[in-house]
């Protein structure tokens, strides 16, 4: 912990010094950018994954002339030591969504799907929502789903996926919405979703190593996912397509899709251009459009800055597989990288800087993942190790040092909440409760942190013998009740209180 500032400074200097080298090439505007094939970039990527504790990474770029280059570093599995190659398949996680969106635009171009007509005209939306009686379900359109304004939660928990707001009124990221759109595409095409997306997007673009369902061949080519500390996680093998998250692909294959976005062949250019225009503004420099986030970036150039208000981007997070992509129609360039680690998104800012050139990307900050140059990243790793190796007391001791040295990191509600769940998933209940309790102390008016603390006590109670549960049950009830006091719309807290009543 005492080296946090030094660590951050070293990486900040490294990032700022990642300028063009002898192997750089020129982009369409004459400004040099890093060549993916250059030894200097490969070396920097190796240094990056080592600092971020990421086992393996595959990166690909699309140049203004359509050329695709790839670079791979690290291992596909820490246990086997097998290297990442250009054939290595990763989970694309939410990078699935832009591909599904493109498949929807194929239907729009054919006149079979209207972005503004309710999906209820195509699919039984009420049945999809497990019988939820809400007339607003009948208002949800493809446009609402693609711009994440449907009102659905990201994923349903216990019970129907109740709408959080009127469709079209605000932004709320939702995988559920994309699953509904996938059902509509199946109805319109008469094909299972994986077959439809394969026939309309993947196969025409030559994405031969990509699939929305598990293939037997992936047993030999798939990377193994790892948690924040490098422990292998069990590999999911989806038998059915999930429109929001089940794409398996390689960096090179996904770059073929990015090239299609820059040079459309399957969908009219004017329709693709709508994907670069924000449908809804959600933060400074951040909006959302048809299946993509849209950010405003100012590229730093020797002859002056260039504002680019239509950079498309998306991140992916399936836990042990995390990834990021960005493309600039103005510059005609794109990049995607895939990793087999929960730490994978800590590389986003540095990777974009190295490959696309100097610029601040508001999307990276908005996504909220600590970057490798950020003291919060090292704090995350130290706190997590303390919890796994030393339990609750080690968490409190490590936190005390962090609180003294970097109080702004110790006050990061989202960081501590995420760490608490990382510990909870490892069944290290005491350490998880310690993290959640610290978060409650510092954010007593946050309904979310009380909800998380309640879950910690609930999980520990369920793991204990019946005669040892009383105190944890009481603590969980108190936490959930306080969360409801702060947020009367917290349906999860209500459901968990019912679950606790049955213990």
Image: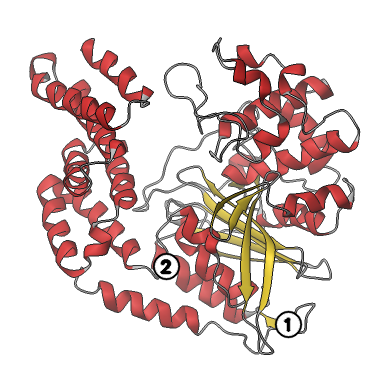
Colouring rule applied to residues: secondary structure
Q: How many marks?
A: 2
Mark nearer the viewer, 1 or 2: 1
Q: Is residue 78 left or right of residue 351?
A: left
Label 1: which residue? 25
C-alpha separation, residue under disc 1 versus residue under disc 2: 26 Å
Q: Secondary structure at mark 1?
A: strand
Identified at 16% across, 43% down, the residue is: 434
Q: Which residue is mark 2?
A: 50
Dot 1 alpha-carbon crowd within 10 angstroms: few under 14, some 14 to 19, many 20 or more: some
Q: Secondary structure at mark 2?
A: helix
Which corner quadrant holds the N terminus? bottom left
Residue 306 % position (x, y): 68, 77
The quadrant holding residue 120 is top right
Q: Is residue 55 visible?
A: no
Q: Is residue 317 above or below residue 330?
A: above
From the viewer's perspective, tell me whether residue 119 is left or right of residue 363.
Answer: right
Residue 107 in view: yes
Residue 273 image point, x, y percent: 80, 53
From the viewer's side, name the closer residue of 364 and 382.
364
Question: Left or right of 78: which side holds 2?
Answer: left
Q: Quadrant of residue 452?
A: top left
469 w.r.t. 330: above or below: above
Residue 496: image location, x then y, percent: 30, 20
Answer with mark 1 or mark 2, whichever residue precedes in sequence.
1
């Amino acid at each position: 912990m005492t080296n946090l500032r030094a660590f951050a400074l070293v990486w900040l200097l490294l990032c700022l010094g990642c300028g063009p080298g002898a192997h750089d090439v020129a982009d369409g505007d004459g400004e040099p950018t890093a060549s993916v094939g250059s030894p200097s970039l490969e070396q920097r990527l190796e240094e990056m994954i080592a600092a971020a504790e990421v086992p393996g990474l595959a990166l690909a770029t699309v140049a203004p002339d359509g050329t695709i280059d790839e670079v791979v570093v690290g291992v596909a599995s820490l246990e086997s030591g097998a290297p990442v190659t250009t054939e290595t398949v990763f989970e694309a996680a939410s990078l699935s969504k832009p591909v599904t969106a493109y498949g929807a635009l194929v239907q729009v171009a054919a006149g079979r799907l209207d972005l503004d007509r309710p999906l209820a005209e195509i699919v039984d939306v009420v049945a999809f929502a497990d019988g939820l009686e809400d007339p607003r379900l009948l208002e949800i359109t493809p446009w609402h789903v693609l711009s994440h304004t449907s009102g659905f939660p990201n994923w349903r928990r216990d019970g129907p996926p109740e709408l959080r707001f009127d469709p079209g009124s605000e932004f709320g990221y939702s995988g559920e919405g994309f699953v509904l759109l996938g059902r509509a595409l199946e109805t319109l095409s008469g094909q299972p979703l994986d077959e439809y997306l394969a026939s309309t997007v993947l196969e025409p673009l030559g994405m031969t190593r990509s699939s929305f369902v598990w293939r037997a061949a992936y047993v030999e080519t798939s990377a193994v996912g790892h948690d924040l500390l490098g422990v292998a996680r069990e590999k999911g093998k989806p038998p059915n397509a999930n429109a929001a998250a089940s794409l398996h692909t390689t960096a090179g294959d996904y770059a073929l899709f990015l090239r299609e976005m820059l040079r459309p062949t399957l969908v009219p250019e004017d329709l693709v251009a709508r994907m670069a225009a924000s449908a809804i503004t959600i933060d400074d420099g951040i909006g959302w459009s048809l299946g993509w986030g849209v950010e405003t970036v100012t590229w730093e150039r020797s002859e002056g800055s260039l504002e680019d208000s239509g950079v498309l981007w998306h991140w992916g997070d399936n836990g042990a597989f995390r990834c990021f992509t960005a493309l600039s129609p103005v510059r005609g360039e794109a990049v995607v990288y895939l990793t087999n680690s929960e730490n994978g998104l800590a590389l986003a800012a540095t990777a974009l800087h190295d490959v696309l050139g100097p610029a601040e990307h508001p999307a990276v900050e908005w996504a909220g993942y600590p970057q490798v140059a950020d003291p919060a990243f090292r704090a995350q790793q130290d706190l997590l190790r303390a919890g796994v190796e030393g339990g609750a007391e080690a968490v409190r001791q490590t936190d005390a040092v962090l609180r003294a040295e970097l109080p702004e990191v110790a006050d990061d509600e989202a960081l501590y909440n995420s760490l608490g769940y990382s510990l909870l998933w490892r069944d290290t209940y005491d350490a998880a409760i310690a993290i959640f309790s610290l978060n409650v102390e510092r954010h007593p008016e946050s309904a979310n942190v009380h909800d998380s603390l309640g879950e910690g006590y609930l999980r520990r109670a369920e793991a204990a013998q019946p005669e040892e549960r009383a105190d944890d049950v009481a603590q969980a009830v108190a936490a959930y009740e306080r969360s409801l006091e702060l947020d009367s719309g917290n349906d999860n807290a209500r459901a968990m209180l019912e679950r606790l009543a049955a213990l």
